[in-house]
Image (cartoon, rainbow, N blue to C red):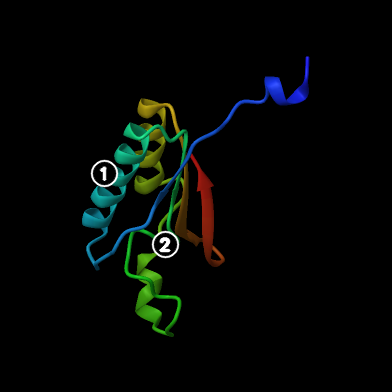
């Protein structure tokens, strides 16, 4: 059998959205975007960088470190549960809080 005949196609969904300072509102908007992408047939859904907050990487403000979160944590719990419910892979970027510092982490749920 020809290799091309046994390869399947994967449909990718991209969620680009405006964000505000309210983390829960941003998460709700991301969930809506993931559900819409799934409804349109996406099997893998990619969220934009640091989707839970306003984009802060273009300024130096130490208060932004308060936006960091533990991984696993509340955001990963929500996204993992949603990925399992919909049967999709979700790729998400979160600002990870670690004992020794902070890092932007890309997750696959």
Residue ID at (23%, 54%)? 24
Q: Nearer the viewer, residue 6 or 37?
A: 6
Q: Is residue 79 left or right of residue 106?
A: left
Please tell me which residue is depicted at 40% across the width and 81% down the height of the picture: 62
Q: Mark 2 points at which residue?
A: 50
- Residue 83, by quadrant, is top left
Question: Residue 43 at what x, y percent from top left?
Answer: 47, 33
In this view, 80 is above or below 94: above
Where is 24 relative to 10, above or below? below
User: Is label 2 in a helix, a strand or a loop?
Assistant: loop
Could you tell me residue 18's position as x and y percent? Answer: 28, 64
**Left or right placement of residue 90 versus residue 31 in this view:** right
- Pointer 2 or 1: first along the chain: 1
Asked whether 19 or 5 is in front, the reply is 5
Mark 1: give few (<14), some (14-19) or many (20+) Cα within 10 Å. few
Residue 52 location in percent, x, y?
34, 59
Q: Where residue 80 sits: x, y (%)? A: 41, 36
- For the residue pair 99 and 37, the one nearer the viewer reads as 37
Mark in front: 2 vs 1: 1
Compared with residue 8, is residue 76 higher up or lower down, i.e. above or below? below
Tell me which residue sits at (49%, 36%) in the image: 11
Q: For residue 32, which numbered disc appears in the image? A: 1
* Residue at the image position 54 percent from the left and 64 percent from the top: 103
2 and 1 marks in contact (CB < 8 Å): no
Q: Is mark 1 on a helix, strand or loop?
A: helix
Q: Give the distance between the C-alpha atoms of the residues marked 2 and 1, in whole angstroms.
A: 17 Å
Which numbered circle lies on residue 3?
A: none
Q: Mark 2, residues whose alpha carbon is within 10 Å: few (<14), some, or many (≥20)?
A: some
Tell me how many marks there are: 2
Q: Locate the N terminus by quadrant.
A: top right
On screen, 54 above or below 28? below
Residue that extends furthest to the top in the rendered view of this protein: 1
């Amino acid at each position: 059998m020809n290799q091309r005949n046994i390869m399947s196609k994967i449909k990718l969904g991209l969620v680009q959205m405006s964000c505000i300072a309210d983390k829960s509102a941003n998460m709700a908007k991301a969930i809506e975007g993931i559900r819409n992408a799934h409804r349109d047939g996406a099997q893998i859904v990619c969220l934009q960088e640091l989707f839970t907050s306003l984009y802060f990487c273009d300024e130096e403000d130490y208060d932004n470190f308060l936006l960091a979160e533990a991984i696993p944590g509340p955001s990963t719990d929500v996204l993992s549960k949603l990925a399992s419910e919909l049967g999709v892979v979700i790729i998400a970027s979160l600002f990870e809080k670690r004992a020794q510092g902070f890092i932007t982490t890309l997750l696959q749920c």
